[in-house]
Amino acid sequence: MTKCEITMIRGKYRWLLWQIPAVVFILVIILVSFISCRSTSTEQLPEIKPWVRPPLSTEGIQLATIEPDADGIVLLGAGIAEEGEMIIINFKGPTKLIQSWNQGNVYIIDEATRIGYDQIPVAPVIGPLFGKPLEEGQPGYVMLNNFDHGIKSGSVISIILGKYKREHIIVR
């Protein structure tokens, strides 16, 4: 072989000289991670318990037997919005009282399953989907997340608006 032919062969397989150390390095990393996983699998890891949200309740909340209730709040209705993704509650009342409401003052409980819905969705530009009236006589609304489409049209719910609850409301 001539010197020129030897140089061509070295140039042709030069990439192989770089790949061998890279493959060996990767194999060493895999081996080390496998050994470390085997050593920790025999140790007893602490059990992680998921956080469970306390259930919503209507205990201790007065039943509104007339409309408007003693605070002057009138329930206008409850329905399904956004193709079943949200529940909308429409109401009227004194603006000063409604302005003090936030998440936790308005929620619903499915009477069939006793599951509570109180999460108010937040739109990126708009903010919380909670329409609080600015003038007396204006209607307001609040939208709540309907997880797993648990509430459907025809469901019977209890609605808590401020200090009073309304029972046996049919969702339209």
Image (tube, grey):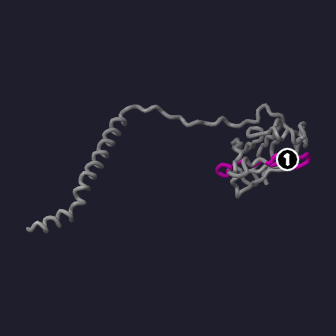
Percent position (x, y) of residue 156? 77, 48
Q: Is residue 28 left or right of residue 75?
A: left
Q: How many marks?
A: 1
Please tell me whether residue 145 belongs to the stretch shown in magenta.
Answer: yes
Percent position (x, y) of residue 18? 25, 55
- The residue labelled by disc 1 is 133
Location of residue 112 by image quarter: top right
Q: Is residue 95 left or right of residue 19?
A: right
**Which residues, given as a range, are shown in magenta?**
131-149
Q: Residue at x 88, y 43 (%)?
A: 93
Mark 1 neighbour class, 10 Å CA radius: few under 14, some 14 to 19, many 20 or more = some
Q: Residue at x 22, y 56 (%)?
A: 17
Kindly state the secondary structure of the residue where label 1 is placed. Answer: loop
Q: Residue at x 76, y 33 (%)?
A: 59
Amino acid type indicated by mark 1: Pro
Q: Residue at x 25, y 60 (%)?
A: 15
Percent position (x, y) of residue 50? 55, 37
The quarter of the rendered structure image containing the C terminus is bottom right
The quarter of the rendered structure image containing the N terminus is bottom left
Q: Residue furthest front?
A: 3
Please tell me whether residue 17 belongs to the stretch shown in magenta.
Answer: no
Identify whether 153 is placed above or below 32: below
Percent position (x, y) of residue 99? 82, 40
